[in-house]
Image (spheres, rainbow, N blue to C red):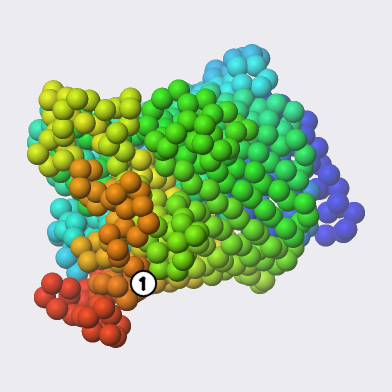
């Protein structure tokens, strides 16, 4: 093709995007694009590493208007893409930028056009099934959810959306002593898809935490969003999942964490600086290791928390990224020092008293433009800097993540990630606040010191761990863990992706090594450890010594899989298939002075062959 014709084609394509009516309509839409749209966010990440788009904030989800601008900027650099990579870009532009109205079987919505209040009503559905072929009949479990939504704009700067999902769920009755999450899933990969409690089909009036028999439940997400001055100011009030980080998974707010209602905003006064803030209401939920049914009033009474965080991102050059994170979890009350977007939570606590759980952290990213990005992130929960022996004192709770993500030359839209993550004992947990003034009642707690009857006026021992809905707000590992991750993924052809992953996870066995679960310190509020009865921060005189102070779980996980998006053939179906081989064994260096597997009847070596199938019907 002559060079002049190629240039003319690109000019015409760009003019169509800029001046077409559908683009102008959608440019006013500021609702968020869910972080579950992984293909889109991975494409933007690859484009950023390859230098095809300017700085994008680490705070997600992005608004649709911000994504529009990013995709159009990438389109101006489309000459750097191979032909099939350009096809992927064109699909994303067609879906998220042009978004031409089509019959409902192709775009999944009905549109009510209006100059001021355009509105859409739409639908989508998805299902997933997963099981261990070694014990397929006992471990097979999954879910199916149908969602309906309504969304629209209110003038030029305001958008809104509400989505309701109804579905069926089943998780096998696993042994909670040995695994965090259902054994029919890859370890540390399961997240609940329902909100609140769930009702078993056999007894719809009951309230349970986990659907170990067939059950039904709902999910609900909603938002009101505003954006001004070309996304220099973004505001949102809604219930969504979030991701705040630059690694493969975040130590601060992770994509796998449960959604929660929050007021949030991002201010970008200059291209090289971004300030994000969020204040929200966290939701109740027992952890996977404690799935007993204590009824909705019992389960929720000790987890009445709010969450506030502030993150500043600075990108003075294309090769340097800096961020600082400051956050707090605190029992519900109108604490305006935490709510104010520009106030440090750490400094505010000094003015209001210590009834809260505070944390801070930061990241440094170094890039080789067009080739790779390296990063290191630190999350600090508690610390005793003057107590000596910093690395073995359990009072020093922190998590660390260091990694490299590189674009792979010669393989289309591909990245290789090598990452190490370490989470110290007790990190993301906290002692129970027994004497919280606004939750303290005159009588003592129930017989177990934790779940007394609300009618007996118990002493509400508030759990302010870094959790929401029974799951971690941060990276999906338990405390006292580390992980080596090697991940290769590629959008190799239009509509086709594949990935290969190796994970080695080591985790302290909760019954052997203190601080290896999300339980509050000491497990019981009345007999638990607090700074008041353990002033030196030694937590009962114990000394942490990773891998050497008790029994540890060792996971070796090899997985591979891919997805097929049939929307490239105008069929609204997406399918995915994953296989994971899991080898789990246990060691006890404290007794045996070696890391060879125990392989006993209580700590057996186990092998899992896990197959996960997903299907979605999503025309848009």
- Rendered view: 356 above or below 595: above
Does 274 sit left or right of 260 as displayed?
right
Which residue has dot 1 on it? 545
Label 1: few (<14), some or many (≥20) within 10 Å?
Answer: some
- Rendered view: 224 above or below 540: above
At which x and y percent is residue 79?
A: 78, 57
Rendering quarter of residue 283: top left
In this orientation, which residue lies closer to the viewer: 498 or 32?
32
In this orientation, which residue lies closer to the viewer: 510 or 199?
510
At which x and y percent is residue 343?
A: 60, 33
Q: Is residue 277 visible?
A: yes
Residue depicted at x 87% and y 59%: 2
Does 422 sit left or right of 609 as displayed?
right
Does 324 sit left or right of 611 as displayed?
right
At which x and y percent is residue 446?
A: 12, 35
Does 509 sit left or right of 574 as displayed?
left
In this orientation, which residue lies closer to the viewer: 527 or 173?
527
Residue depicted at x 55% and y 43%: 326
- Rendered view: 192 above or below 139: above
Describe the element under mark 1 as helix, strand or loop: loop
């Amino acid at each position: 093709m002559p060079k002049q014709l190629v240039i003319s084609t690109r000019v015409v394509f760009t003019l169509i995007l800029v001046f077409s009516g559908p683009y102008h309509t959608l440019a006013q839409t500021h609702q968020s694009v869910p972080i579950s749209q992984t293909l889109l966010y991975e494409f933007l990440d690859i484009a950023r590493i390859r230098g095809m788009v300017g700085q994008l904030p680490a705070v997600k989800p992005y608004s649709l208007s911000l994504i529009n601008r990013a995709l159009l900027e990438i389109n101006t650099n489309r000459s750097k893409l191979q032909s099939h990579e350009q096809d992927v870009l064109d699909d994303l532009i067609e879906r998220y930028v042009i978004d031409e109205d089509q019959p409902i079987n192709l775009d999944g919505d009905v549109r009510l056009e209006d100059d001021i209040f355009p509105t859409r009503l739409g639908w989508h559905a998805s299902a997933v099934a997963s099981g261990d072929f070694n014990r397929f009949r006992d471990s097979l479990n999954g879910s199916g959810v149908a969602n309906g939504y309504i969304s629209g704009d209110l003038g030029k700067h305001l958008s809104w959306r509400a989505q309701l999902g109804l579905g069926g769920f089943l998780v096998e009755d696993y042994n909670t002593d040995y695994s965090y999450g259902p054994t029919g899933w890859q370890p540390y990969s399961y997240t609940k898809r329902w909100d609140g409690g769930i009702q078993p089909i056999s007894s719809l009036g009951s309230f349970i935490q986990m659907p170990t028999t067939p059950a039904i439940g709902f999910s609900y997400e909603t938002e009101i969003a505003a954006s001004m001055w070309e996304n220099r100011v973004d505001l949102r009030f809604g219930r969504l999942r979030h991701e705040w980080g630059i690694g493969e998974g975040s130590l601060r707010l992770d994509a796998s964490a449960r959604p929660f209602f929050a007021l949030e905003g991002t201010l970008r006064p200059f291209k090289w600086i971004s300030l994000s803030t969020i204040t929200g209401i966290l939701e109740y939920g027992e952890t996977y290791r404690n799935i007993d049914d204590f009824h909705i009033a019992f389960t929720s009474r000790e987890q009445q928390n709010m969450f506030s965080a502030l993150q500043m991102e600075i990108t003075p050059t294309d090769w340097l990224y800096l961020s600082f994170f400051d956050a707090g979890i605190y029992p519900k009350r109108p604490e305006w020092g935490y709510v104010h977007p520009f106030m440090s939570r750490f400094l505010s606590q000094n003015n209001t008293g210590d009834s809260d759980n505070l944390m801070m952290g930061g990241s440094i990213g170094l890039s080789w433009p067009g080739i790779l990005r390296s990063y290191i992130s630190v999350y600090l929960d508690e610390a005793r800097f003057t107590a000596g022996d910093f690395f073995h004192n359990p009072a020093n709770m922190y998590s660390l993540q260091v990694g490299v993500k590189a674009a792979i030359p010669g393989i289309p839209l591909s990245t290789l990630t090598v990452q190490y993550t370490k989470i110290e004992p007790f990190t993301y947990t906290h002692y129970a606040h027994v004497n919280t003034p606004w939750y303290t009642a005159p009588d003592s707690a129930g017989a177990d010191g934790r779940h007394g009857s609300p009618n007996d006026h118990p002493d509400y021992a508030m759990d302010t761990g870094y959790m929401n809905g029974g799951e971690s707000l941060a990276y999906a590992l338990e405390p006292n863990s580390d992980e080596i991750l090697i991940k290769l993924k590629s959008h190799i052809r239009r509509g086709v992706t594949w990935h290969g992953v190796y994970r080695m996870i080591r985790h302290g066995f909760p019954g052997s090594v203190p601080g290896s679960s999300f339980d509050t310190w000491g497990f019981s509020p009345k007999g638990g450890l607090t700074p008041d009865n353990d002033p030196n921060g030694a937590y009962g005189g114990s000394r942490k010594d990773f891998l050497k102070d008790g029994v540890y779980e060792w996971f070796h996980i090899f997985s591979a899989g891919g997805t097929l998006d049939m929307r490239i053939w105008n069929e609204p179906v997406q399918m995915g298939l994953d296989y994971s081989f899991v080898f789990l064994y246990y060691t006890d260096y404290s007794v045996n002075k070696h890391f060879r597997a125990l392989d006993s009847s209580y700590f057996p070596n186990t092998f899992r062959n896990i197959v996960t199938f997903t299907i979605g019907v999503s025309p848009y």
